[in-house]
Amino acid sequence: MKEDITLFGKCPYETAQKIFSGKWAIVVIHHLAGKTLRFGELHRKIPGITQTTLTKQLRILEDYGLVERYVYPVVPPKVEYTLTNIGNEFVPVLEQFEKFGDKYIKFINNDKM
């Protein structure tokens, strides 16, 4: 049997790839950048994601320490999500993704003309 070798926590590329491998991870972090949102607010900002998938993605990002969940002791329950300090470290990378995405959109639109 082949030994499972992981470079998570050793190689920066593999570590980042693992953390952000979820389909919605980057989008969730984008929407939490600079703000705190309740679950419903976040869900409305991401068309196409199910509540179940959003819950799973938030839990994964919490497990990695990028997102913090705060549950208020009230009825009905009030839960807010915000980026942690290490989660906020990813915001400049998001800004670069946005720049690249804009350039790529222009590229594919010009290529089709």
Image (cartoon, rainbow, N blue to C red):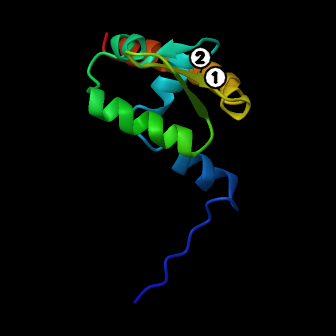
In the depicted structure, whether residue 77 falls above or below residue 18: above
Residue at image position (57%, 68%) is: 6
Observer-nearest of 36 and 100: 36
Say the numbered circle drawn on residue 96. 1
Q: Which residue is mark 2?
A: 99
Amino acid type, label 2:
Lys
Residue 88, image x, y percentages: 69, 26
State whether residue 11 appears in this view.
Answer: yes
Amino acid type, label 1:
Gln
Residue at image position (55%, 45%) is: 63
Q: Quadrant of residue 35?
A: top right
Q: Residues within 10 Å of mark 2 (few under 14, many from 20)?
A: few
Asked whether disc 2 touches disc 1, contact meaning CB atoms under 8 Å apart, the reply is: yes
Name the element at disc 2.
Answer: helix
Residue 21, image x, y percentages: 46, 44
In the depicted structure, whether residue 64 falls above or below residue 58: below
Residue 94, image x, y percentages: 60, 24
Name the element at disc 1.
Answer: helix
Q: Residues within 10 Å of mark 1 (few under 14, many from 20)?
A: few
Q: CA distance from mark 2 to mark 1?
A: 5 Å
Q: How many marks?
A: 2
Observer-nearest of 72 and 82: 72
Q: Which quadrant: the N terminus?
A: bottom left
State whether residue 103 appears in this view.
Answer: no
Q: Which quadrant: the C terminus?
A: top left
